Amino acid sequence: MTAYCTSKYAITGLTETLRLELEPKGIQVCGVYPSVTNTDFLERSIFRAQDDLRTNDLRQQMQRAIESPLSSQPEEVARAIWNVVKHPQAEVIVGSAAIATVAYRFAPGLMSWIVQHTLKQ
């Protein structure tokens, strides 16, 4: 999860700085942030851990997240992207990620606890 989350934060930072730099030139930049999305990316993913058992456990956790009813569907993400092209805005949060984002803003400690306990399972 560390590499995944780090890359998401990097994209957010890049998007926000590009928006600030390009807005005076009339160029709109928007970040579209979906929740975990139900795609086939696990077929190309490489998981590494201390041993094969832990590696397999990490892969299964991600598989459960992808199959969760809370995961975004590709069509939902595509619709959000198309809508932001038609109606520009700074950011769009897709699917259950909106719930997590709001919850984190109001109760960061609680959300950190939930994530930590979810990852242990």
Image (tube, rainbow, N blue to C red):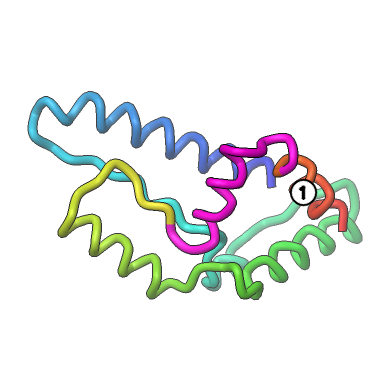
Q: Which residues are magenta?
A: 94-110
> Quick check: 118 above or below 82?
above
Residue assigned mark 1 = 114
Q: Is residue 91 left or right of residue 62?
A: left
Tell me residue 72's x, y (percent): 50, 68
> Quick check: 48 above or below 17?
below
Residue closest to the eye, 79 or 11: 79
> What is the quadrant of residue 40 in the picture?
bottom right
Magenta-colored stretch includes residue 113: no
> Quick check: 93 above or below 16?
below
Give me the residue at 25% from left, 46% from top: 89
Q: Amino acid at mark 1?
A: Ile
Give me the residue at 67% from left, 57% from top: 46
Tell me residue 52's x, y (percent): 88, 59
Per the picture, the main secondary structure of the magenta-coloured stretch is helix
Residue closest to the eye, 37 or 112: 112
Tell me residue 99's x, y (percent): 55, 55
Q: Going by the picture, which residue comes out furthest to the front? A: 106
Magenta-colored stretch includes residue 99: yes
- For disc 1, the neighbor class at 10 Å (few under 14, some 14 to 19, many from 20) is few
Residue closest to the eye, 81 or 7: 81
Q: Secondary structure at mark 1?
A: helix
Task: Quarter of the image for the C terminus: give it.
Answer: bottom right
Give me the residue at 39% from left, 65% from top: 77
